[in-house]
Image (tube, helix red, strand yellow):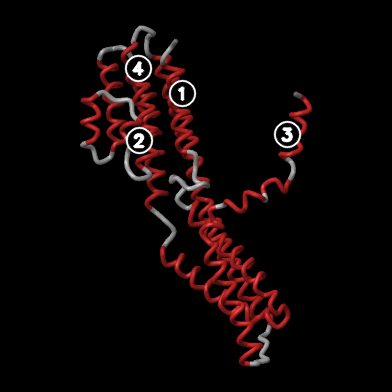
């Protein structure tokens, strides 16, 4: 066993272990045809200039260096902006997990052990909030993931904003417990702050979802990259000849690949390979809340 762990550790530190996965990445799948087109375009430029037109014009390399620098700065800004959105989304999901645990822990401390029905109901609704939130940020809530009775499910299906409706169910049950004297006013205030924190997380996630990178900026970057790729073969073909074809393909893949990755991670709540693990976090919330509130 120790030898297997050592071998596994050595493999994990082996840098080249990730190279085979390059051929299965989404970026390569998306850009494969475009890379072929760029290669054919570069070959055609070289062939027509040297074999047919016989033009001996070599532009200054300073021009291409300057344009490459500008393009690099634009891509850095694009990538950083997209990553900031991804990282903020990850922080919010982490807060969702922590606040759900905190709410469950406080309810566990405030509710008597004999309040089995209330514990079950609140555990279900806290878990439902996490599942509803992740799908609300995608294409609509999956009611088969929620723990609901028939009457509550019918009422939620009529709601436009299901996570808000689930928060309302939690508030109503907490208010009922307060009026019946099971929890005190101080405890009610503490729980209220915890539910507000969940609502704030929902609003922040919706802000990321509903505020994509401005289309004008994305279009400007694409057009600049297109222009750069179109003229770059004229700057390198006199030195590299037909070796310019693979070089252009690699340059195109490097630049446009970054832009594709930026587009993918700027909306971090979907199903793309690099999106956030919202499904796993929702399951973890359910498991943690059940463990806290539903005593074996």
Q: Rounded to the nearest whole Å, what is the CA distance between mark 2 and mark 4?
A: 18 Å
Mark identifier at residue 287: 1
Task: Say whether disc 4 or disc 1 marks the residue closer to the N-terminus.
Answer: 4
Q: Which residue is mark 2?
A: 132
Q: Residue at x 37, y 19 (%)?
A: 187
Task: Measure how far apart labels 3 and 2 are at the Cα level.
Answer: 39 Å
Q: Which residue is mark 3?
A: 8
**Could you tell me how far apart the alpha carbons at marks 1 and 2 are, in whole angstroms?**
16 Å
State the image coordinates of residue 15 (x, y, percent, origin top left): 73, 47
Give the CA distance from mark 4 to mark 3: 43 Å
Whole-number angstrom distance, CA of label 4 to CA of label 1: 13 Å
Q: Residue at x 33, y 10 (%)?
A: 115
Tell me the crowding category of disc 4: few under 14, some 14 to 19, or many 20 or more residues within 10 angstroms, Cα based: some
Q: Which residue is mark 4?
A: 120
Q: Secondary structure at mark 3?
A: helix
Q: Residues within 10 Å of mark 3 (few under 14, many from 20)?
A: few
User: Counting other residues with Cα less than 10 Å from the Cα at mark 2, is it few (<14), some (14-19), or many (20 or more)?
Assistant: many
Q: Name the secondary structure under disc 1.
A: helix
Toward which corner of the image does residue 225 lie, by quadrant? bottom right
């Amino acid at each position: 066993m120790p030898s297997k762990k050592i071998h596994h550790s050595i493999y994990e530190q082996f840098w080249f272990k990730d190279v085979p996965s390059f051929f299965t990445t989404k970026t390569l799948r998306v850009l494969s045809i475009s890379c072929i087109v760029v290669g054919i375009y570069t070959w055609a430029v070289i062939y027509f200039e040297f074999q047919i037109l016989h033009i001996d014009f070599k532009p200054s390399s300073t021009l291409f260096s300057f344009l490459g620098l500008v393009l690099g700065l634009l891509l850095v800004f694009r990538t950083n902006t997209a990553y900031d959105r991804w990282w903020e989304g990850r922080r919010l999901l982490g807060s969702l997990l922590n606040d759900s645990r905190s709410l469950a822990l406080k309810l566990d401390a405030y509710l008597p052990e004999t309040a089995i029905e209330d514990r079950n109901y609140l555990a279900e609704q806290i878990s439902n909030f996490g599942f509803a939130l992740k799908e609300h940020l995608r294409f609509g809530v999956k009611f088969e993931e929620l723990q609901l009775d028939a009457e509550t499910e019918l009422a939620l299906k009529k709601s436009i904003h299901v996570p808000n409706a689930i928060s309302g169910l939690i508030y109503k049950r907490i208010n009922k417990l307060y009026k019946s004297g099971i929890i005190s006013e101080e405890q009610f205030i503490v729980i209220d702050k915890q539910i507000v924190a969940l609502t704030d997380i929902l609003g922040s996630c919706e802000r990321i979802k509903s505020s994509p990178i401005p289309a004008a900026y994305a279009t400007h970057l694409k057009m600049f990259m297109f222009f750069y790729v179109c003229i770059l073969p004229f700057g390198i073909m006199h030195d590299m000849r037909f070796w310019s074809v693979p070089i252009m393909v690699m340059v195109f893949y490097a630049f446009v690949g970054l832009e594709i990755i930026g587009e993918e991670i700027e909306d971090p709540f979907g199903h793309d390979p690099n999106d956030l693990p919202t499904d796993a976090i929702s399951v973890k919330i359910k498991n943690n809340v059940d463990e806290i509130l539903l005593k074996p």
